[in-house]
Amino acid sequence: MPRPASAVFKNVCPLDCPDTCSMKVTVRDGAAVELKGDAEHPFTRGFLCQKMARYLDRVYSPDRLMHPMKRVGPKGEGRFERISWDEALATITERFDAVAQSADGPQAILPYSYYGTMGKLQASSLDRRFFHRLGASKLDRTICASAGTIGYEYTVGPGRLSADPLAVPNCRFIVNWGSNTVNTNSHLWSLMIEARKRSGATIVAVDPYLSPTARRSDWHIQPRPGTDAALALGLMHVIWRDGLADEDYLARATVGAELLRARVLADYPPDRTAAITGVDVTTIETFARRLATEQPSLIRLNYGMQRHHGGGMAVRTIACLPAVVGSWRHPGGGAMLSTSGAYDFDPRFTRPDLSPPGTRTVNMNQLGEALAGELPGPPVRALYVYNSNPAAVAPNQAKVLRGLIRDDLFMVVHELFATDTVDYADVVLPATSQLEHVDLHGSYGHHEVMYNPPAIDPLGECRSNNDVFRALAGRMGFEADIFPDDRTLMREALDGGPNLRGVTLERLEAEGSVRLNLPENYAPFADGVFPTPSGKCELYSERMLRDGFDPLPTYIPPLEDPLTRPDLASVFPIQLLSPPRPQFLNSTFANSPRHRAGAGDPTIEMADADARSRNLADGQWAEVFNARGSFRARVSLSKTVRPGVAVATGIYWNKLSPGRSNVNSTTSSALSDMGGGATFFDNLVEVRGLAE
C-alpha cells in the first residue's frame, strides 16, 4: 500500500532506558521531518531526553552504514568493500554451516547481543529462534541487571513487581538509591518533583558520587562504593532498636523477621555501619527514622549498586526495608527496581525448546575468556554481533580485543554505524533504525504496552534484525513456520498472562500505547501477599539457602576494596566508578558530533586531596591504569567524590578516544555474587599525570 504524502506516526524510543518514551514523527514525501514527544502518553507526557530529541540526526546521519560489506584489510583497521546482500548471506551461511558440521559443532558459534533496541521483535525473537535452531551456544545476557534482579526476586518473588511510577506523587520520603534518576529516568524524576510540590516530599540520593540527581536532591548520603548492603542493615538496626518497625505488616506479610532483627541488632550497630560505609552515625540514625516515619516512603533502586561482587545481596538487602517499615501498604510506597516483570508476554515467544539439550551458555561478561578458549566447551570460531558494541562496552577490554583480532575467528556485525566492534568484522550488515521497522515494546519504567510502526522505508539497503534472521533461516533450510511474519510474532507475544488481557495488536495499532491490565491505584503488596514460595516477603529465604547463599540479608564487600584488599590497594588505591555520561547511552551516540561536543573529553573526577598527592591539576591529562589496562582522561576537580574514589563517566568509543581505549580497559570480567552479573564498579586503579 502506498504511503500518504504526509502523515504523523506514534513511534517508541528503542533505547535501553526505563522511560520507553512515546514519540510523534511527522513524515512528508517519505522523509521524517519532525520528531517530538507524545503529550498524550500517560508517563512520558510529551518530553524527550537530550539524546532522543535529536534522533533524526542519527537516522539521517551521513555516517550510517547503508550496504553490506566484507573486510579487505587486517582486522581492527576497519577497511571494507561493498558487496551484495546475496553475497553477504551466502558467506554467513557457508561459514556457519562449515563450523556446525565440524568436529567442534554448532556450539562453536556464539551470538552476542544486548539491548541496543528494547523491542520484543528486534531484540529477542527470531534471533533467539535462529540460534536455538542452529544449535549455537546460548548467551547469558547479564551485563546490566542480572545480579540485582535475582536479589530482588529472592525477596519479593518473581516478576520484580514494583511500586507504580504514576503513584509516586503520593510519596513523602523518596530515596534514589544508586540511581541517577535525573539523567537515566527523567520522567520518574518529574513525578518525584511533583511529590515535592504536592506534599513537601523529601528527595534523598544515596550515591558515592555527587551525581546530577544528588545535586538536585534535598539530602545526599555518600557511602563508600559497594557498601550499600551494610548501610541498609545499619538502618534496620536503628529502626528495630527504636521501635519504628511496622510489626503488624512484619507479622502477616513476612517470614524471618525475628531472625533478621536478631542479626542486625547484634552485628550492625551504627558505629560499625559507619566504619564500613563511611557514613556518620548521626546520618544513619536520622535516615532510618525518617524512612520509617515519613510515609509513604519509596526507595528507587537502580542497577549501579549491584555492579560489584556483593551486588545481588545488596539489592536483596535494600529490598527488605519496605517490608520492615510497612511502606508497601501505600500506593506509590515500597520499592521500585523495574516494572518489566509485570509484562507477562508469552514465555514461549523465543522458542527455548529449539535449543538442543545440554547446549552450553556463555556469560557475556566473559567474552574475553570465551574468545581465548578458556571456558568449557568448544572454542568460539564464529561470532554474530547485533544490538551491542562489545569492543567498547565489554569488561576486560584488552582481552576482548585480543580475541576479536584472531584471524581464525569469523565475525558478523549487524549495525547502524561503524562502531569499534565493526572494525574487527569479516562481514558487516547495515541495520535499520527505529523509524524503519516494526516493533512491540514493554518497559522497565512504566506499565504501558507500546507499538512502533515503520514510519519510513529502510534507507539504503538496511534491513532489520528479523528480516536478516528470516533470510538466514531460509538459506540454512530451517522450517519456515518457526520464522513467521512480524504481525504473527506480535500476536504470539501478546498471547500471554492476565496482565495482557485486553491488549490486542489491533488496539495497539489504533492507540499506540495501552496500559497493562492493572488496577488504577496499583499497590502490588498492600495486602501482604507476595509471589514467593511462602506467599510472603522473604526476609529469610529457604530458596537462597538451597542455592548456597546466606538466607538472611548480609554485607558482601567488593572484591577490590581498600578495607578488604589492602595489598591490592597499596598499588592501586583509587576505587573507580564508571556510570553513564548524560550525552551517551552506553556507547550509543558516542560517535555523534553533537553529542561528543556536549560530552567533551573523557574525564576522571577526583577528590582534591587525591589530585594534590599526585601533583595533578584540574584539566590536566592523566593516565588511569591497573594491571588490566589503561585509558586517558582529563582530571576534573569538581568535588563530586570523597577521597579514595574517582568517577569516569562513559562510554566513549575507543577509536574516538585519546590513546584508543576507554574505561573498560581497566574493568574486570569477574562476576557478581548471584546472577552472573558484571562488576564494573569493583575496580581499583591508580592515576598519574601525562604531558599534554
Image (cartoon, rainbow, N blue to C red):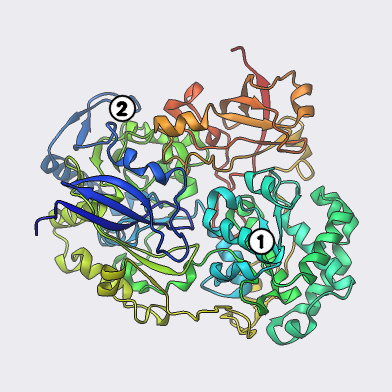
Looking at the image, residue 571 lies above or below residue 27:
above
Lower position in the chain sequence, tag 2 or tag 1: 2
* Residue named by callout 2: 78
Question: Farthest top residue?
Answer: 691
Coordinates of residue 659 in the picture (x, y in percent) = 50, 22
For mark 2, give the secondary structure: loop
- Disc 2 packing (10 Å; few <14; some 14–19; many ≥20): some
User: What percent of the width, then of the height, locates residue 320?
Assistant: 70, 70
Q: Amino acid at mark 1?
A: Lys
Q: Position of 580 compared to 542: left or right?
A: left
Count of numbered circles on the image: 2
Secondary structure at numbered mark 1: helix
- State left or right for residue 262 relative to residue 213: right
Residue at image mark 1: 197
Residue under the point 48% across and 26% down: 657
- Image quarter hosting the C terminus: top right
Q: Quadrant of residue 141?
A: bottom left
**Quadrant in the rendering for residue 208:** top right
Q: Quadrant of residue 350?
A: bottom left
Q: Is residue 349 above or below residue 252?
A: above
Describe residue 122's horizontal placement relative to residue 646 as left or right.
left
* In front of the other: 433 or 50: 50
Say which quadrant the N terminus sits in: bottom left
Amino acid type indicated by mark 2: Gly
